Amino acid sequence: GIDENQYKEEVKKISSNYVGSYSANKNIRFYPEKCLLPEESLDIYQKYGGERVDAYEFEFFKQAATFYLTVTQRASMRELAPEFLDLIKAHLNKSLQACKWLITQFSNNDILIENLFQCAIGDMRKLTVGLLYCAMIRLYEDEKDLLDKYWQHKEGLKDSYNGSYLGNFINLVISNFRIARIYSELNTQYFQLLSRFASLGKEARLYLLKAKIVGRILNYYMQDSSPYQEYFHDYSDLSYEENMTPELGLPLKLENVKLSLWEDLFLRKRDLQIAEAAQDYTFLFETLSWCIRSCEFNSGDSQTFVDDLRYTSLDKRELELLKLDEKDITGLIDSCSSKLAIKHLGSILLHFCVENIEFDTMLRMALLTCINDKQLDEIRPYFLIFKRYLFIQDDNTEVRVIEGIREYFNVLRNNVKYTSFMAKFTTYLVKLCNIHRGVAEFMASCPEEWDWVIEWIRKTPVPTKNGQQFKNHTKEIATSHYKINKLEDVKAGKIVTFEDEYDSDDDMYTHKFYNEEKLDYKPTGQNWLSAEVIKSVDEMIHIQYFVYSQQKSHWLAVDSEDIAPHMAMQSRHDIKTIEKDRLEIEKQYRKNAQQHEESAGHHGMSESDRYSAEVNDGESVSD
């Protein structure tokens, strides 16, 4: 727990930086609503008697949590936030009373809006969700059997609140969908909180399903194109008791602040930008994925289910919104802005394919049509879902692989004149051969349908582009060698797959990080290297690594695409094989340059010197 000495030491360190006018004035810009610190938050020193610290432990916790939420997370200097979170979470993990207190503090619309919508600093919103998630995990084990009683007793009761702190809190959270629309740019963590609740277990998902969360989310996503706006914005079935006097103190309302004309114009412009900005749908799709994969739409068993709930009582309006055509599928995929979003949306679409030949065929055609027609930088989401589509295990698996790969061959033929597209498509084909034995075996059975691809790769030179680093050029040559060798092996029936290797399209979002854990990390412009976790705070990790013997550190969100389990990427067979070949190619270039230099007897900078300058300084090789 938090002992008195630890608490006082943290307070002393933080108060010297933040407390007073600096926090109240300097940091006011970090919150759109100009939420001033409540006066009581500055009165942090209290005298305690000589009794045992345990008698005051809960009070210490409340004071530390209040100080963090009202001072530390609003400050421009936030280095001490992880230390505070460690202390707070240590107490949450062992104290049910503390978890109930924290959830009760956030069972207030103003505090929820301030922390999840109005805070413009994404990292701080993530840390807040992590704090609430910690409390929800502890509460869930105590209250999960209470959650469904809310719906069992709903009929005929004027007020059916059943004493579940979590149920009460989630009802309040769901009732803020209208507010989420106002803060489109800043509402990512609102949906992350819902997805974290959905991940707790099937009782949590059943609660959300009965709260019509599927329809409410789809209604939100579709905006004015949904015919059920009024229906899904009716929250009368979600009764809750709002905590009107939270101990955190209520934020200062904007209407109570006197603004100049310029300030008013600035805030209006800012609010419009926030409302109209592009939205990150990652956690919206994750929440949907958790809940939809608890539902049964067609008979049959599948690995796409997340539990044994098999819910079949979705509202008829929800079922109507779930009817998708090819245009809907394309629009959904185009709205994905991250690998994690693609993963969650893909899991929804694949769940609909189970024992549903009509939707299965429509999805396959939509994916391959877009792979064929989209621009080069727009193809990746469609291939990631297509790859997972081929892995669905049901009675249609073999047909799915054969028809899917044959249609993919047609995509290759359609793009044979476009070098950049073919380079990407052949990379995807080789990847499928590496990770899916069924794909490799089918290709081995019909080499006449695709062996022209090998000759295309062999005869198509790797271009040397202006602005392209020499290292990248040699890597492309080595990659072409790898593709040819792999496809030649498949053609000859030498099938070796690597299903157990870490897939670069996977993520570590659900991984439980710990301090001093080793990871693979890919800094911008660098190869994968080893890193170490310095601090883990649920939604964020602080890592340390070395680049050219220089120590560096960086904060990352746990859903980052640049991290992987330790040695998972560094030891991948394809990466190692290509890198080994690349070094051999560079060695040969160096040898050829040296021979040319000696035979020509050049004066001034030699060819080998020029090569060294290009590699060391990162300059490009000209045509």
Image (cartoon, rainbow, N blue to C red):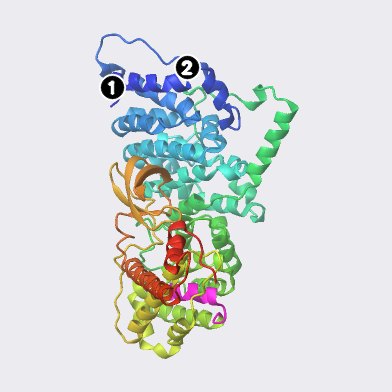
Which residue lies at the image location 37% right of the left edge and 32% below the top edge? 85
Q: What is the magenta range?
A: 415-431
Q: Is residue 256 left or right of residue 291?
A: right
The relative height of residue 463 versus residue 525 in the rendered view (above or below) is: below
The answer to whether the residues at label 1 and label 2 have Cβ atoms under 8 Å apart is no
Q: Nearer the viewer, residue 345 or 503?
A: 503
Q: Amino acid at mark 1?
A: Asp
Residue 426 horizontal/vertical position (percent):
46, 76
Q: Residue furthest left?
A: 52
Q: Is residue 153 visible?
A: yes
Label 2: how many Cα within 10 Å (few below 14, some 14–19, many 20+): some
Residue picked out by circle 2 = 42
**Taken as a whole, is the magenta stretch helix, strand or loop?**
helix
Q: Is residue 37 visible?
A: no
Q: Is residue 20 left or right of residue 65?
A: right
The relative height of residue 129 versus residue 585 in the rendered view (above or below) is: above
The relative height of residue 115 versus residue 420 in the rendered view (above or below) is: above
Which residue lies at the image location 65% right of the left edge and 22% below the top edge? 256
Residue picked out by circle 1 = 3
Secondary structure of the residue carrying numbered label 2:
helix
Q: Which mark is residue 587?
A: none
Label 1: how many Cα within 10 Å (few below 14, some 14–19, many 20+): some
The quadrant the C terminus occupies is bottom right
Q: Is residue 422 located in the magenta-colored stretch of the structure? A: yes
Q: Nearer the viewer, residue 52 or 5?
A: 5
Residue 246 horizontal/vertical position (percent):
48, 24
**How far apart, in angstroms, are the residues tagged by discs 1 and 2?**
21 Å
